[in-house]
Image (tube, grey):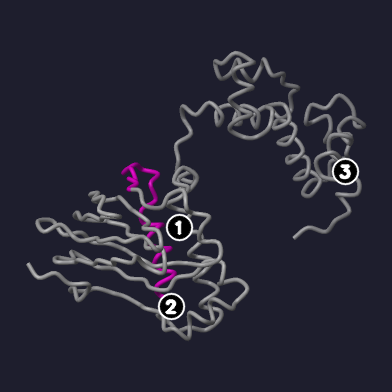
Amino acid sequence: MEYKKDGFDNQRAIVLPKSIKEILINNELTRLLYVTDIGYYPKAAGHYRTRPSGSEQHILIYCTEGKGWFSINENRKEIQKEQFVIIEAGLPHTYAASETDPWSIYWLHFTGEKSHLFHSIYNKVYSIDETPEARFKDRLILFEEIFQNLEMGYSIENLEYTTLCLWHFIASFRFLSQYREVNKEKKGDVIQKAIRYMKNNLHKRLSLEDIASHTGYSPSRFGQVFLKKTGQPPLNYFNQLKIQKACQLLDFSELKIKEIASELGFYDQYYFSKVFFKQIGESPTQYKKHHKG
């Protein structure tokens, strides 16, 4: 089999010229994180690349079909469909498509002053489970946002836009759980179950015991789990939801402050105003005076 760096049927690739990289380095926004090379190699039979001294940029390889492998410091690992790796800049490495089932890969080289923020996922193989909430197409749309805007030319606007897309694209790998949240089924998630219960009972004065009982947890255990997941105690979160609803009522209803307090389960208007001020930084009366939209 012939080994080659590129030259595959229907491949696409863009390599930014040195002059454009200098613009990226000196731009206040793009210098934080930017693409230097980007492409797609479908069914890349014979694909093989080795860099004894490593790359100047980090290299993201996302395999969508077939198989391949990569080696860092002679430590070889396989990579296959719906797996990805980010090879850290400066590390000697080799990567190649499988000889029997060559991979299709989306790939890009990136760097920037803040590229180290993704260091925790460098040099490891990660799998993206094929579940209904996986958002595979959405991730590839982000890739196309980057590619097609660069393909349209290197205006400052295009370069800055692709940098913002790149943050989101890499974050879709780094924060898999959060990326899936928009499509995620909430059944079985005790925190989401508790939050739905809170939202459905904003008119009540729920206790910690009330909320914990709904989830099937003891109050102490539920409080610990909720705090760890959200960063807030359950009753604080409940009040936050109440005040969020209060803001909506102040914005879009003719209800008086006293009526809103009553509707949200506060025992009097003054306590409601105290809680509102603590969260919003101004009184309900001051808030209502603001023009919205």
Mark 2 highlights which residue?
A: 150
Q: Are marks 2 and 3 in contact (CB under 8 Å)?
A: no
The disc, 2 or 3, on the residue closer to the chain's N-terminal end is 2
Q: Residue at x 60, y 71 (%)?
A: 29
- The three-letter code of the residue at mark 2 reads Leu
Mark 2 surroundings within 10 Å by alpha-carbon count, few (fewer than 14), some (14 through 19), many (20 or more):
many
**Which is more toward the observer, 3 or 141?**
3
- The three-letter code of the residue at mark 3 reads Pro
99 is within the stretch colored magenta = no
**Which is more toward the observer, 130 or 231?**
231
Among the 4 quarters of the image, the one containing residue 4: bottom left
On screen, residue 27 above or below 187: below
On screen, residue 264 above or below 66: above
Could you say where residue 229 lies in the image, as x and y percent from the top left?
58, 33
Mark 3 highlights which residue?
A: 284
Q: CA distance from mark 2 to mark 3?
A: 48 Å
Callout in the foreground (1, 3)? 1
Could you say where residue 34 lies in the image, as x and y percent from the top left?
49, 69
Q: Is residue 208 left or right of residue 130?
A: right
- The three-letter code of the residue at mark 1 reads Ile
Secondary structure of the residue carrying tag 1 is helix
The residue segment tinted magenta is 125-149
Q: Is residue 47 left or right of residue 39?
A: left
Secondary structure of the residue carrying tag 3 is helix
Mark 1 highlights which residue?
A: 170
**Which is more toward the observer, 14 or 91?**
91
Q: Residue at x 18, y 64 (%)?
A: 43
